[in-house]
Amino acid sequence: MQQVTLNNCDKTMPAIGMGTVLSSRPGADPSETMKSAILEAIKVGYRHFDTAFIYQSEKPLGEAIVEAIHLGFIKSRDELFITTKLWCTFAQRDQIIGACKLSLR
């Protein structure tokens, strides 16, 4: 898969990634649906995932990563490139660190 070298370091990022957003479909658990989709994406080779607190997909993404490691699709979280966003409702100086920790959790 094609990689892009980041300007501020020697790290690379997969050029193609999967965007995630939780959406509901009648009769389906949206969190489980998202987790399954991410797990399948990891299985077929995706290594870049985009998420955000407001998308409600950070938790299913984390759960999918744990399961992907357990199933042997990847050896560690270090094989993945995850992007998320600090949402504007958390942009006050006293909220930033807590919001970042919440996303990392």
Image: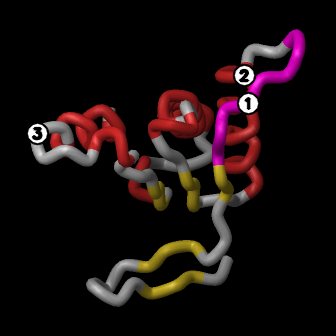
Q: What residue range appears in magenta?
A: 20-27
Q: Which residue is mark 2?
A: 30
Magenta residues, dominant SS class: loop
Q: Residue at x 44, y 52 (%)?
A: 84
Which one is nearer the viewer's eye here, 88 or 50? 88
What amino acid does circle 3 point to? Asp
Task: Establish if 70 lies above or below 52.
Answer: above
| Rendering coords of residue 81 (x, y %) | 47, 61
Sequence-first tag of 3 and 2: 2
> Do the numbered discs 3 and 1 sit on residues whose CB atoms are within 8 Å?
no
Q: Secondary structure at mark 2?
A: helix
Judged by depth in the image, the label closer to the viewer, 3 or 1, is 3
What amino acid does circle 1 point to? Ser
| Rendering coords of residue 76 (x, y %) | 43, 48
Q: Which residue is mark 1?
A: 23
Q: Residue at x 65, y 40 (%)?
A: 21
| Rendering coords of residue 102 (x, y %) | 30, 32
Q: Which numbered dot is residue 94?
A: 3
Q: Residue at x 29, y 40 (%)?
A: 90
